[in-house]
Amino acid sequence: MLWRIGLIVVFLAVGTMLGIVEIDYQRFLVTPLGVANTTVHITKGSSVRQLAERLTAQSVLKHPYYFMLLAYWQGDQTHIKAGEFAVTADLTPQQLLKRFTDGQVIEYTITLIEGRTFRQTLAVLDAHPQLCGEPLAPQTDAALMTQLGRPELHPEGRFFPDTYRFPAQTERLTVLRRALERMERIVAEEWRDRSPDVPLTTPDEALILASIIEKETAVAAERPRISGVFLRRLQRGMRLQTDPTVIYGLGERYDGSLSRADLRDVNPYNTYLIKGLPPTPIALPGRAAIHAALHPTDDDSLYFVATGDGGHTFSRTLNAHQQAVRRYLLDKKP
């Protein structure tokens, strides 16, 4: 008789314990973690047990077995993604698991800037601490373009300047490929919607002109007008005579100011000497510059000169242009 009573007591105790555990587990599921914000690195192939132990070691969880039970109960034990994840105090264990299974990794950003050259862009990519892989700058242009699947292209101006998001330990070449593909899409879109009377024959010519426009002005309203000047000069067989191409052609020889000797330097980018466009872009053009190259202002200006305040003044005739040069440049020299 006593053993029956003892057995009943044991069953009651076990049932009570299970009830307490069930209540505790349900509370665990919906209670915010309440921990200091931290990051968790999940390596590829990590098991639920390994993840639960890591979370416990980082003081994210107090009940690793509850977390494992949650993962198995929901069938998510094999759906956890690798990567770097943010853990914040307001997350519940259920929300945290969903973050892991959805692959909501921490994303970093890098900005490729309009007007920068290809080599300057490579230096930015190489310097980012969250990008990995072989450094890009030591590699030749030909080697990089071959890796990107475009061995026939010169790299200058081929990468769209924008802010790109990526998870930690993304390869530098991956970001570069995204910028290349983005530029190709945008140029194709802009070329398709170009003004019908634009005297350019290929998208590459548009990209070259856009890069010159990008370097000539940062004033948005001026871009279509500068585009118009260059296109009219091309149509009339006039040399472009634009300083940014000369500077690009000089490369490391450029010391910060252009001399008369620089304007006589014989190279394929010296538009004071060559007719037509230079052989390649000279920088990364933004979409506004590409659009301007294909949607020029329709007026009769053939010249422009910087006014010293970031803008330009435009002229129809050489005489008016020379007067503007004297007003804004020569008369201001010490």
Image: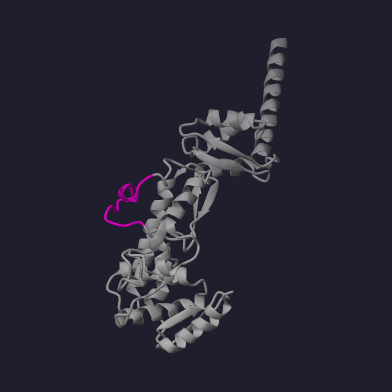
Q: Spot the residue most to the top.
A: 2
**Residue 232 image offset from top left, x and y in percent:** 35, 82
> Could you tell whether 140 is left or right of 288 in the image?
left
> Could you tell whether 251 is left or right of 84 in the image?
left
Residue 114 against residue 2 in the figure, above or below = below
> Could you tell whether 95 is left or right of 150 in the image?
right
Total marks placed: 0
Q: Please check the rendered image and state whether residue 43 is part of the magenta-colored stretch, yes or no.
A: no
**Residue 234 image offset from top left, x and y in percent:** 32, 78
Residue 319: quadrant of the picture:
bottom left
Q: Can residue 291 be seen in this view?
A: yes
- Taking the spot 49% from the left edge, 31% from the top edge, the residue there is 46
Residue 154: quadrant of the picture:
bottom left
- Taking the spot 51% from the left edge, 75% from the top edge, the residue there is 220
Comparing 90 with 211, the one in front is: 211
Residue 334: quadrant of the picture:
bottom right
Residue 216 against residue 135 in the figure, above or below = below
> Could you tell whether 201 is left or right of 102 in the image?
left
The quadrant the N terminus occupies is top right
**Residue 123 image offset from top left, x and y in percent:** 47, 50
Q: Can residue 1 be seen in this view?
A: no
| Start-end of magenta stretch | 139-155
**Residue 254 image offset from top left, x and y in percent:** 45, 60
Residue 152 against residue 310 in the figure, above or below = above
- Taking the spot 30% from the left edge, 73% from the top edge, the residue there is 276
Figure colour scheme: one colour
Comparing 6 with 316, the one in front is: 316
Comparing 114 with 10, the one in front is: 114
Comparing 265 with 159, the one in front is: 265
